[in-house]
Image (cartoon, rainbow, N blue to C red):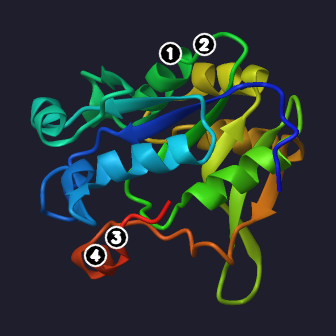
Amino acid sequence: MASTLRTPVSAVLLAAGAGTRLGRGPKALLPAGGIPLVQKMAAVLADGGCTDVCVVLGAEAARVRQAADLSGCTVLENPDWAAGMGGSFRLGVNAAPAGHAVLVALVDQPGVTAPLVRRLIAAHQPGRVTAAGYRAPGGALRRGHPVLFAPGPAAAAARQASGDAGARDFLAAHPGLVDVVDCSDLSDGGDIDTPADLFRLGGYQG
């Protein structure tokens, strides 16, 4: 389905964490089809229709820059990455060009594909927030990532972001603003937190 959204979409890829629970260094450097995961996910966002991609690094940022080809991306470093996702969210969203919608994605969700990104962009309505949704075992549709913010909500969420919450508090406070799009046929929305989740890594498919 072609997008009818006229507002350009900037992507923010949050990739600052140290991967402490996983115990393999930054998740940004996990191998995904022969390339670092952060490089794969940045390509997914661009292939999905985002006009520009901002990658926010933190833990071992110099090592990530050296290992991953992020040419074509804006790469920012969050010096306070250890304080939680909120600072990285704020840094990335505030770097988006004025008037752009902002799609926020997490580096540790390799199941997110370009078709999924395109679906969110196609479904997005002006002034609103569009989130990928995934079916729980019981069938309920749960909000997940990526999340696409219209310019106004993006700025408001960035102002409110703190600690490790990212946009969670903003979204919880404005449930009527959020449209959840079922993406269960494209991904289960799972992330990589522990070694048991490493099966999610695989080849890049645009």
Does residue 21 appear in this view? no
Question: Disc 1 marks which amino acid?
Answer: Ala
Mark 1 or 4 closer to N-term?
A: 1
| Residue 167, quarter of the rendered image | top right
The disc placed on residue 97 is 2
Pinpoint residue 27: horizontal percent, then vertical percent: 25, 54
Q: State the separation of the CA atoms marked 2 and 3.
A: 32 Å
Identify the residue at image location x=68%, y=78%.
Answer: 185
Category of crowding for the residue at label 3, using alpha-carbon neighbours closer than 10 angstroms: few (below 14), some (14–19), many (at least 20): few
Pinpoint residue 143: horizontal percent, then vertical percent: 69, 60
- Which of the two discs, 2 and 4, sits closer to the camera? 2
Number of numbered labels in the structure image: 4
Question: On the image, numbered disc 1 is attached to which residue?
Answer: 95
User: SS of the residue at dot 1?
Assistant: loop
Q: Is residue 77 left or right of residue 60?
A: right
Category of crowding for the residue at label 2, using alpha-carbon neighbours closer than 10 angstroms: few (below 14), some (14–19), many (at least 20): some
Question: Disc 3 marks which amino acid?
Answer: Gly
Question: On the image, numbered disc 3 is attached to which residue?
Answer: 203
Q: Is residue 81 left or right of residue 72?
A: left
- Which of the two discs, 2 and 3, sits closer to the camera? 3
Category of crowding for the residue at label 4, using alpha-carbon neighbours closer than 10 angstroms: few (below 14), some (14–19), many (at least 20): some
Residues marked 2 and 1 touching at CB (< 8 Å): no
Does residue 98 appear in this view? yes
Question: On the image, numbered disc 4 is attached to which residue?
Answer: 198
Question: Disc 2 marks which amino acid?
Answer: Pro
Q: Is residue 10 left or right of residue 201?
A: right
Identify the residue at image location x=38%, y=57%.
Answer: 108
